[in-house]
Amino acid sequence: MVALIVAVFTVPVNVVIEAPGPTWNVLDNGSSSSEDVLKVSGTETYPTEGALRMTTVSVSGCPGYPVTTADLIAAWFSADKRIVDRNEVCPQDQSAEQVEETGKAQMTASQDSAVIAALVETGKAGAMHLTVTEVTEQQTSTKVQAGDVLETITPEGGQTTTITSFSQLRELMTTIAEGTRVTLGVRRGDQQVAAALTTIAPQEGRPAPCWG
């Protein structure tokens, strides 16, 4: 009996628990931390007052942050916590370092998106352009090249969508099933190029299909 109780509180289970995390004031300007949450360069900025808080999600169950049966039971009875399959968040073959790097990349992307949205809203920037930075091994057979600027996506039998932001692209990809033939309209220098390819299973930690 004692061994069972000890196991409930010590043996990890293969799930992830999501809960509300801390909030960060993006207007803090480093007054309560070592670095600014948002940094803008290349244009004039102004002092800010008040607070504009960014919400976060606390994740337990990834490498370095194990979840026990006791944690799982507590999450079942909590309205503020959600239990999800670990592979949807941090696949078992990822190390703690890989999970941390993924989190940092997501944070950087979120910060960049916030800066771009602010510049577009204030008229400092005209539009967002999505540029291909690299082509993976699964995609080398396509006509897409690093440096291409994505402009449109047309699923086979569907309508053409003009891509104006990364968040729009990400949302659109959740509606396109794996194995769907799509045509990308890209700008390569002064040329307009159409690249036909097929969506593949999402990469580890990504919920939407990718291109292949």
Image: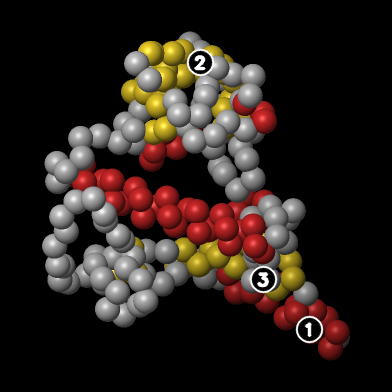
Work out how far the residue at label 1 is from the one at label 3, CA to CA, in angstroms.
22 Å
Query: Is 140 placed left or right of 18 in the picture?
Result: right
Q: Which residue is mark 3?
A: 64
Residue to which mark 2 is pinned:
195
Q: Does any portion of residue 179 appear in the rendered image?
A: no
Colour approach in the figure: secondary structure
- Residue where numbered disc 1 is placed: 5
Quadrant in which residue 162 is drawn: top left
Q: Position of residue 82 (x, y in %)?
A: 54, 61
Which circle, 1 or 2, is nearer the viewer? Answer: 2
Kind of residue at badge 1: Ile
Q: Secondary structure at mark 3?
A: loop
Q: CA distance from mark 1 to mark 2?
A: 58 Å
Q: Upstream in the sequence, badge 1 or badge 3?
A: 1
Question: Element type at marker 1?
Answer: helix
Of labels 1 and 3, the one closer to you: 3
Q: Earlier in the sequence, mark 3 or mark 2?
A: 3
Q: Nearer the viewer, mark 3 or mark 2?
A: 2
Task: Inspect the image, locate mark 3, and give the three-letter code of the amino acid beneath it.
Answer: Gly
Front one among 41 and 26:
41
The C terminus lies in which quarter of the figure?
Answer: top right
Q: Residue furthest bottom?
A: 2
Amino acid type at mark 2: Ala
What distance separates the C-alpha of mark 3 from that of mark 2? 42 Å
* In the rendered image, the vertical position of residue 53 relative to residue 206, given as above or below: below
Residue at 55% across / 17% down in the picture?
A: 143
Mark 2 Cα-neighbour bin, 10 Å: few <14, some 14–19, many ≥20: some
